[in-house]
Image (spheres, rainbow, N blue to C red):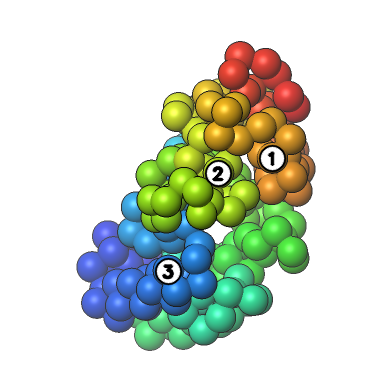
Amino acid sequence: MKIKLADIEKDEAIKCYIKKADESLVALGYTEHSFPHVCKVAATAYRILETLGYDTRDAELAAIAGYLHDIGNVVNRIDHAQSGAVMAFRILDRMNAEPDEIATIVTAIGNHDESTAFPVNPVAAALIIADKTDVRCSRVRNQAISNFDIHDRVNYSVKESELYIDKKEICLNLKIETDICTVMDYFEIFLNRMILCKKSAEKLGVKFALIMNGQKMI
């Protein structure tokens, strides 16, 4: 059966896992990982592969992987990519998805977290880029600036964030307030993520660029 993103989005069990996973991250003090994040990642992953000329079905699989990629946080933040991949396998198998497509989605989810990530296929590459470039102030839930940790500062400082995609380059263009977060703060948290985006873009046959306050950093 050809599972569609719409099928995934209306599944009540999946909604529950995403909601409960984000509740755990709230307790741990993490930025938002709920429906705004997974919906944005799903849409961006689809747009990446669609723009680069990949098959529409591959783009759909990337969107499904994007929507499901963080459900493993319901188990534990540590190794959430791997536990999420196992959960996704059971969900997709229950929905009678085709084994080849289950394998592609599960592989992408299992390879999206920076500690173990690698763009093993185009769907995984699109998921990595979509996930790691979702940087925005609305992800910060802690409203007490005096209590911000570095993750809060980095996300809160981002006032404009655009991901541009063409046949030659994927470019993350950020405008940040440097009185809240310095460029060095950003790279302390995001250097490994940006390197992953660079490797993922190479997997897709394009370059990756980061522009911050008008200056090209990568």
CA gap between label 3 and label 1 equals 22 Å
The residue to which callout 3 is attached is 26
108 up-or-down from 54: above or below: below
Identify the secondary structure beneath mark 2. Answer: helix
Residue at 46% x, 85% y: name it.
90
The residue to which callout 2 is attached is 153
145 up-or-down from 113: above or below: above
Q: As shown in the figure, which amino acid type bears the numbered disc 3?
A: Val
Q: Is residue 54 visible?
A: no
Residue at 65% x, 76% y: name it.
79
Discs 1, 2 touching: Cβ within 8 Å: yes
- Asked which quadrant contains residue 13, the reply is bottom left
Residue 202 in percent (x, y) is at 74, 38
Q: As shown in the figure, which amino acid type bears the numbered disc 1?
A: Asp
The residue to which callout 1 is attached is 185
Residue 38 in percent (x, y) is at 41, 57
Instruction: From the image, state whether disc 3 or disc 2 is nearer to you.
Output: 2
Upstream in sequence: badge 3 or badge 1: 3
Identify the secondary structure beneath mark 3. Answer: helix
Upstream in sequence: badge 3 or badge 2: 3
Residue 103 in percent (x, y) is at 58, 71
Q: Quadrant of the C terminus?
A: top right
131 up-or-down from 171: above or below: below
